[in-house]
Image (spheres, helix red, strand yellow):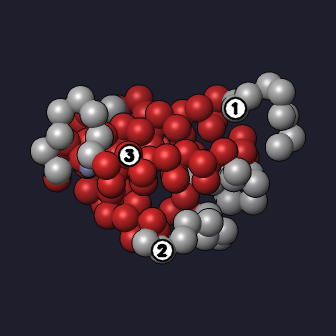
Amino acid sequence: MARPMAGPGPRIRRERLTLEAMIRLFCRKRHHTRGALCEGCRALQEYALARLERCPFQERKPTCAKCRVHCYREPRRSQIREVMRFSGPRMLLRHPILAIGHLRDGRRPAP
Ligand SMILES: [Zn+2]
């Protein structure tokens, strides 16, 4: 939005990696997939990445849990919450760098 030609900044790039890691982890454990996501999780990831691309806060984005804009529509909203609930606590072990980045983002005040 503010930088249409520059592509996403580091905040959004990290958020994208975090989302992908969380959905991948969820799908592998819950749906027993290997390598590729199942159909449902692939659609959810596509939706989530599209929401992120349109996030009005971009580099000033708070973590989704703290955001006052509820940009997900049902049933995607319930689906992503389930993914977060499952993968959130597991992220620190599997993707410590992403998890720590996310914790830091969560301490920033929401615009
Ligand atoms: Zn899946």
Pointer 3: what residue?
42
Residue 1 location in percent, x, y? 83, 43
The outermost residue toward the left is 32
- The local crowd at label 1, few if under 14, some if 14 to 19, many if 20 or more residues have their Cα within 10 Å, is some
Observer-nearest of 47 and 85: 47
Residue 81 seen in the current view? no
Work out how far the residue at label 1 is from the one at label 2, CA to CA, in angstroms: 26 Å
Q: CA distance from mark 3 to mark 2?
A: 16 Å
| Point 49% across, 46% down: residue | 46
Q: Closer to us: mark 1 or mark 2? A: 2
Q: In the rendered image, which residue does mark 1 sit on?
A: 8
Q: Sequence order check: which comes first, mark 3 or mark 2?
A: 3
Q: Which residue is pictured at 33% across the width and 32% down the height? A: 95
SS assignment at label 3? helix
The residue to which callout 2 is attached is: 74
Q: Are marks 1 and 2 in contact (CB under 8 Å)?
A: no
